[in-house]
Image (cartoon, rainbow, N blue to C red):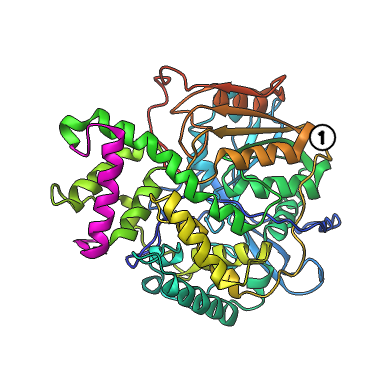
Amino acid sequence: MRLRGPWRTVGAALALVLAGAGAGTGVAQAAPEQRPRPLVWTDCPADPSGAPVDPRLRCTTVRVPLDYQNPGGRTIEIAVSRLATAKPGVRRGILVHNGGGPGVASLHLPTAQEAGYPQEVRDRYDLVSFDPRGVGRSTPVSCGRSAASLPNELVFPFPAPDGAIDQNVSFARQLARDCLANGGELIRHLTTANTARDLDRIRAALGESKISYRAASYGTYLGAVYAELFPGRTDRFVLDANVSPNVTWQDRLASWDPASELRFEDFAAWAAERDATLRFGATPAAVRANYLALAAKLDRTPVTHPVAGPVNGNLWRAIYRFDSYHESLFQEIADWWRFLADDGAGPVPYWWLVKGTPGVPEDNDVAALVAVLCGDTPAPKNLDRYQRKVTESRQRNPIVAGMGANVWPCAFWPAPLEPAVRVTDRGPANVLLLQTTRDPATPLAGALGMRAALGKRARMVTVDGGNHGAYDPWTPSCAVTAADRFLATGALPERDLFCRPDATAPAARTAVVRPS
């Protein structure tokens, strides 16, 4: 999930952010193998981020059923990319990626990910990705909204400064209405289970008997669902920044509040160490108090940013939360803080300047996010419950003011068309889980839920840290070493592991990859 605002959606958050999963007991059936149509590969379209497109990256489309219960009915397009890097003689197959979200366009991921892999991994795999159904260059979904009508602090439901949720209820109700009215048939069929089925159609269209897979955040849930539906078609799976697969979306969203609270300890310590220049507080406790004071001040009197417009307390909380995903972004939090405290120039992060993608609706990322959230699992309908949960969470978790516990459009959505896929330990032992201990978006408790669900199928490597994702070659650790070894050789650790980040980063890997 991504930071967004009236200027335009961005291409970088959370990736999210998060994973949706269901507590339903029914298991959707895998689609039968069919002879795929020949693929036509072309140049890839422009990258929405503005990054140059690697000429080696090739793109195609695969047609899949809109409704897998009616495979002979209407079809939609899935945009697929491939970066051929494997060497003949040692090539193992394809390594598929997903950018998280849900709702994150992922077509250009192979180019971004290639630089992080060691040569022995690149030698064995062609790198593949795709825009999930409903997203980006795949047949896109829309709620008929403009970007200006989807402010970040309402899409992500921050309550009012006094804790009231009336505005959130109204926004959620109206967004649900617009999505259902304008999303057509696609919006009800945009689910994690159907995206997993699409992935298997992609596998077949590429002529592969199995896939390997690496993804983070929401992508871990997608990977786990694929491994449940198609266990015999999985090769080597690396799931990073995990979510508990067998709970509801509302449970998952509520976990953001305590996770953000825990992660703030890292930022507060970082800022306190730099108090001589930042002057946010000489101790972590002082930094925390001053952060909350600034948020309360902005609740009363927003500060106008030259690009973002008025920055109120909730947009400040959202900016902090997004930039807490990686320690490399802590300086950006500091730049914002100084600007909002009238002590610095206004930062203009690159993602605020990202323009829309031609042919893709302005609200596409939000429409896809809402569709998956509401299509995977049902949400409580009792609005008093949300107010009660927000009130309780605000008291315990003031850093994001109880946002995670608040109401989403799913409270006004029809029941899902099928039960969520329940992830189990049935299948081959070929899954490596990676996790940090203080991830603000996919907390450790969720990863432990994934570990318990997969049982003997998985090993887990946990890193003492707070970045959103442990597979970070620019912050190397035992997680990176274990993942690279597993992808290159198939060797899982003999047991679950725990470590701290390595003391130094390798000289050849100096760039910083933003969290998706």
146 to the left or right of 371? left
**Front position in the image: 365 or 263:** 263
Q: Does the magenta segment cover residue 213? A: no
- Residue 51 visible to an observer of this rendering: no
In this view, which residue lies farthest toward the right? 32
Residue 205, percent across and down?
74, 52
Residue 245, percent across and down?
69, 48
- The residue sitting at 68% across, 46% down in the picture is 223
- The residue sitting at 46% across, 35% down in the picture is 466
385 to the left or right of 317? right
481 to the left or right of 354? right
The crowding category of the residue bearing disc 1, from other C-alpha atoms within 10 Å (few below 14, some 14 to 19, many at least 20), is: some
**Front position in the image: 53 or 389:** 389
155 to the left or right of 488? left
In this view, which residue lies farthest toward the top? 503
**Front position in the image: 484 or 44:** 484
Q: What stretch is highlighted in magenta?
A: 279-308
User: Residue 374, relative to residue 131: is it above or below?
Assistant: below
Q: How many marks?
A: 1
**Front position in the image: 390 or 61:** 390
User: Residue 143, relative to residue 431: is it above or below?
Assistant: below
Residue 109, percent across and down?
52, 45
Residue 445, percent across and down?
60, 40
Query: In the figure, residue 268 lies in which quadrant?
Result: top left
In this view, which residue lies farthest toward the bottom? 181
- Residue 129 visible to an observer of this rendering: yes
Q: Name the residue under label 1.
A: 428
Q: Which type of secondary structure does the marked residue at label 1 adopt? A: loop
- The residue sitting at 59% across, 34% down in the picture is 85
Q: Does the magenta segment cover residue 290? A: yes
Amino acid tagged 1:
Pro
